[in-house]
Image (tube, rainbow, N blue to C red):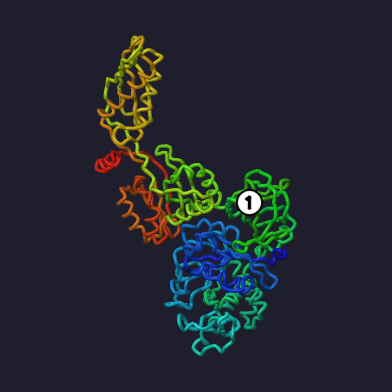
Amino acid sequence: MKVYPSKNIRNVGIVAHGGAGKTSLTEALLYISGVIKRLGRVDEGNTVTDFTPEETKRKVTTNTSLAVAEWKNHKINLIDTPGYSDFFGDVVAALRVVDSLLVVVNAAAGVEVQTEVIWEYADKYNLPRMVYINKMDRENADFKKALTSLKENLSGNFVPMKLPIGASETFSGIIDVLSQKAYTYDDNGKEIEIDIPQEYKEEVITMKETILEATAEGDDDILMKYLEGEELIPEEINKGLKKAITEGKLIPVFCGSAYKNIGTNYLLDNIIEYLPSPIDLDDTLNEKLEKGNLSALVFKTLADPYVGRLSMFRVYSGTLKSDSIIYNSSQEYEEKIGQLFLLQGKNQIPVSELKPGDIGAVAKLQNTLTGDTLTDKNNKITLKGIDFPEPTLPVAIRPKTKSDEEKLSVAISRLLEEDPTLRLYKDNETRKNILIGMGETHLDIALERMERKFGVKVEMSTPKVPYRETIRASVKRIEGKHKKQSGGHGQYGHVFIDVSPLPDSEFEFTETIFGGAVPRQYIPAVEKGIREAMKEGILAGYPVTNVKVNLADGSYHSVDSSEMAFKIAAVQAFRKASKQAKPVLLEPIMTVEVTVPEHFMGDIIGDLNSRRGRILGMEPKGKYQVIKAQVPLAEMYRYAIDLKSITQGKGQFKMELTQYEEVPANITEKIIQQAQK
């Protein structure tokens, strides 16, 4: 494939809610442009962009994939993104590097949850957009209803450029509003011109006038001509449309059936004609970008046990060439670039260089990760990284076998390199590895991928709550005595301790020994014994905290006493004291912030109350409400799943540990019973 200049490149993200037909549309565009000879099907697992075993098994997109179409001396980088919230991190990365979006909407369902979420992110990036109302051939398809759904749920001025002829089983063709021509299609998706059906003629005239008005508003010269009643020529219309679309003043709406390849043939023309190139937002950038210092952003990393890392990137300035030395300014590390290539799904197309605005990939970078900047060492540039969403669903993982345990560390580190929306930490209290993801499916697929790529099998479970134990009463002169006589030296340690609550600190040890009742050399052993005993409380075996221990008295034997004997005596004394000092169980309390559309507030507050939560307050944030509450961690492990269900996927939350509080008596009993089992 030849190297294209920036002005002839289009970077288009194909986005939508899951099931709207993004991958099928990508497949149709690749077919029309001649990249593939037959249309693949998601159901058959043979599409270009859904190629991983996890995607073909589930028949859904779980990874951002790249594909390239050449059309009329232009290069279109198509980025097919996942449509389910569990994989939203990939969508965020794609939005960071594309110049425009092709948003796919199901003609029967209208705007769905994930489309709304993506649209809000696109607003932040000021990305120009086109909408394709797909599945016009499906049952309950309704173009006007879908168009109304766009206007009611999303921001923007939506203007239909094409109209469908019929719907569902009567869907038979497309009307081009601007040219006022109608087409039907043969079995291969080839256009056949027909007369516009009589019942559509008036609507087409009205729609064309709407387009011309929107076009004129995008350019002062064209507006003046339009207001004076002069007819606009096609070049003026296209110029005005492109400017209006690039500036976000107009969002063109198209329609068809990607599966049947109806109404997809004109999309490539419209992408080239109306969507911006990398330099269209600022014409003065052309020369600056071409001749400027190198800067490229890595937006996705794939980990392969045989090939190593595969890094996908976008060049922002300068020219990146194969077999060159570059500098990672994010990691402050020099990297060697080998063969550059374009990605056609899983297939690689070698290229000699990539111009500003182009998207490509390279293998075997040593220290480069997603979000890093590649640049020149002598002219360093560091680009803004990618703000990935925080994962919220934790699971405990453990290797199934000894062999898995030995390989787990390397496999997990590779998995985290590949997916920035995964987090891993070791819970020191429960001694478990905790993996946090965006949802159940996200975690399932991550672990499937780890088994497939690295041969490591793990088991998932709900994390244990890191409860703690403490005391509510003070006790004095509790005795601990370890005395054992056997052949030769015996063992003798004898202590009396005072134990009391210590609300503002985890542990304090003091001693008030008088007259050498416990020799100085044995006092550290007593403290060591106390600390060891605190690792497992007497209620349910959880660590003990917030206690003060004073070594008050004791006795020793000049021959049989030892550090070990006093340590054992201290353990005995502390356990005895704990039983008498009104022991209680403590649980971690989280401060939770839940962001939801206003009409879900009642449901969320009711749900938080049912989780033993305390509502702290509410405050508006745009069209959302932020609800703040304190909730026990034990009630929050599955909250990511429940919140998604309650809010139809529109809610988000974050939480952090605030404090520990006493567990209610009825729940304490259950925890103790479970621990005893």
547 w.r.t. 60: above or below:
above
- Judge by depth and name the residue closer to the eye, 245 or 415: 415
User: Residue placed at 27% from the left, 26% from the top?
Assistant: 576
Please say whether residue 32 is visible from this viewpoint. Answer: yes
197 w.r.t. 502: above or below:
below
- Which quadrant of the figure contains the N terminus? bottom right
157 w.r.t. 486: above or below:
below
Residue 203 in percent (x, y) is at 51, 84
Q: Name which quarter of the figure residue 573 lies in.
A: top left
How many tags in the picture?
1
Q: Name which quarter of the figure residue 444 lies in.
A: bottom left
623 w.r.t. 218: above or below:
above
User: Residue placed at 39% from the left, 17% from the top?
Assistant: 563
Q: In the figure, is residue 401 to the left or right of 475?
A: right
User: Residue placed at 73% from the left, 46% from the top?
Assistant: 378
Residue 40 in percent (x, y) is at 55, 71
What residue is shown with label 1? 383
- Judge by depth and name the residue closer to the eye, 368 or 159: 368
- Which quadrant of the figure contains the C terminus? top left
Residue 463 in percent (x, y) is at 39, 45
Residue 514 in percent (x, y) is at 33, 11
Which SS class for mark 1?
A: loop
- Judge by depth and name the residue closer to the eye, 319 or 154: 319
Label 1 Cα neighbours within 10 Å, binned few <14 / some 14-19 / many ≥20: some
Amino acid on which disc 1 is placed: Leu
Please say whether residue 115 is visible from this viewpoint. Answer: no
User: Residue placed at 62% from the left, 83% from the top?
Assistant: 229
- Judge by depth and name the residue closer to the eye, 603 or 164: 164
